[in-house]
Image: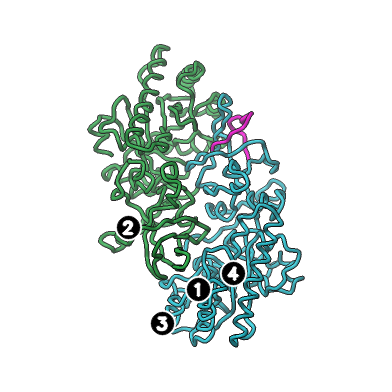
Chain colours: A cyan, B green
Amino acid sequence: MRQKAVASGVKFRPHVKTHKTAEIARMQHGGALGPITVSTLAEAEFFADAGFLDITYAVPIPPEKIDRAAALARKIDALNLLIDSEPALRALEEHGGVFDVFLKVDCGYHRAGVDPNAPQSVRLALAIAHSPSIHFQGLLTHAGHSYNARSVDEIRRVAAEETSALTRFRAKLAKEGLGEILRSVGSTPTASVVDRFEDVDEVRPGNYIFYDAFQATIGSCTRADCAVSVLTTVVGSYPERRQAIVDAGALALSKDLGPDHIDPKFGYGLVCDLNLRPLPMRLVALSQEHGKLEAAAPPPVGTQLRIVPNHSCLTAAMYDVYHVVEHGNVVEQWRPVRGW
Amino acid sequence: MRQKAVASGVKFRPHVKTHKTAEIARMQHGGALGPITVSTLAEAEFFADAGFLDITYAVPIPPEKIDRAAALARKIDALNLLIDSEPALRALEEHGGVFDVFLKVDCGYHRAGVDPNAPQSVRLALAIAHSPSIHFQGLLTHAGHSYNARSVDEIRRVAAEETSALTRFRAKLAKEGLGEILRSVGSTPTASVVDRFEDVDEVRPGNYIFYDAFQATIGSCTRADCAVSVLTTVVGSYPERRQAIVDAGALALSKDLGPDHIDPKFGYGLVCDLNLRPLPMRLVALSQEHGKLEAAAPPPVGTQLRIVPNHSCLTAAMYDVYHVVEHGNVVEQWRPVRGW
């Protein structure tokens, strides 16, 4: 991903919320302390302590966290904040500091962000750009609707929307006198399927570092690309009802339903053997510490399995430590940041 | 719940997985260090360190954790293990120690447990009872199918199945010469709706300590009984699409769908004001750190809300600390155990 960004001549600012570790953030930059994207202020503070000095906090900032963000911003080179409303702009102005800010734009996902086609979005962009409290960085979007795709072709269409929404909006702002501003995009599906990043200045994919069963199903990656799994043990086996119980439940995996828009019976993760070969079993239900498998031949008690998670970001966040495996041996332990 | 158990003359062994704190476990016993139920060995070790000396580990034990369980068992009065298969019995026997063991029975939930109507279940119970490696404690079941109920009447029917399954199975074992053995039941819905515990020797509810939006919907409790909530802030407001974004996402709430068997559009938690009065808003989608609200009149940026979780056990486990609120002030902080 980094090489593709370099070859495309765009800034690479990977999201680190998927793994939340300093070790992997450095790997994303080939060993360097490059620009990163975070999803919580706790992550921003943790990575700043680890030496990352150029950070984008890519969730619209809650007004009550502005003081804390300002304190962090004073310690590092750049802490870019996200806003998408006049009240958020006023809250920053009332603080009295000067903030690096991106305007969040909705490119079709309809989560956060301003409508790039609405006249009031132009007015807000100009108000931000001209505010004495703001160093305006540019436009930022996240094509989360790429996760609804069912094929690589569909993902490519979303990727085109993602960049064109920002490019068209920027052209409108240029007519209003706003000079060159950055266009920042980021979603692992769209970043994965394009051969080259075009019509964009910065990319922020995150999940690609592990991928997961969801991404493999929609076509962002292959199953072999999935780099994180949960080791689990069969603790109950019930051949008469073609079921087994494993000791990985909702707290070990998260209750993310994965690619249920493609396969409603996909289950709560991809069940594999210890060599990560998929097995003909479905993880059909999770309670807190139990996972229920359905299989024509359920494995006996004591069998160890590996579950490739549906959503590696959510699963990885359930653990206090990563066990880094090389040739079957645990060679390192990495500790993620937690909380908010 | 404790008073009902005492009045019914049954042993009270509450599950502590819902909160995972020593403070609340003591509250469950009116300040004493009474018998408890846990869902992980990490919980067992944590509560043993906190002085709880009579613990049931209510998930079938994975064979590779027997050594660790044996080490803990030596330090406390009782560590009851659960098994439901011959391979698990053999694994305990091969260890060489002597273990306190319950036989897990399936009373209709079809997760773990032996079929109480199957002849081989009688044979397994006798093999366990006669094993020199085992102090046989009795029969344990969990009526998890009470969570599928849509009304108090349905929960009452499951409660009757839960106790009768154990009582009938115990009668069969008595004919085979097995003397008095305990019948242990536990599920918050069934324990909540009965006026008195009958035909049972021990009860193990857990979720009742907080309850949640799910339990209030199926009829285990009222909304006013819900004792845990997540404070969140509106960080984006989009009246034109009748939506808002809060800074509580999948990591703050868990992706549990709650009572979707009763209301498929229930959403990811009950949205309330700061005084826990429900608001006419639905939490329709969660990503890692964003929650999407739908509301006819979405609240403005900066509004604080409290979300009563769908499943308090899963939501509480996402936090490193409880903020204990009295009259609007945080008066204590309690730290739960994590991991496995």
Residue that badge 2 annotates? B324
Query: As drawn, is A115 to the left or to the right of B20?
Result: right
From the viewer's perspective, is residue B231 above or below residue A267?
below
In this rendering, the label closer to the viewer, 2 or 1: 1
Q: Secondary structure at mark 2?
A: strand
Calculate the distance from the C-alpha at mark 1 to the C-alpha at mark 4.
11 Å
One can see residue B94 in this view: no
Q: Is residue A76 above or below residue B249?
A: below
Residue flagged by tag 2: what amino acid is it?
Val
Q: Chain of mark 1?
A: A
Specify few, some or many for label 3: CA neighbours under 10 Å numbering under 14, 14-19, or 20 or more.
Answer: few
Give the extent of the magenta segment.
Answer: A292-306
Tell me the residue that label 3 is attached to. Answer: A94
The residue positioned 54% from the left and 34% from the top of the image is: A245
Residue at numbered disc 4: A141
Q: CA distance from mark 3 to mark 1?
A: 16 Å
Mark nearer the viewer, 3 or 4: 4
Q: Which residue is mark 1?
A: A84
Q: Which sits in the foreground, B50 or A306?
A: A306
Label 1 packing within 10 angstroms: few (<14), some (14-19), many (20+): many
Q: Amino acid at mark 4?
A: Thr
Letter of the chain that mark 3 sits on in the rendering = A
The residue located at (40%, 54%) in the rendering is B335
Q: Position of residue B130 (x, y in %)?
A: 47, 18
Viewer-closest of B309 and B31: B309
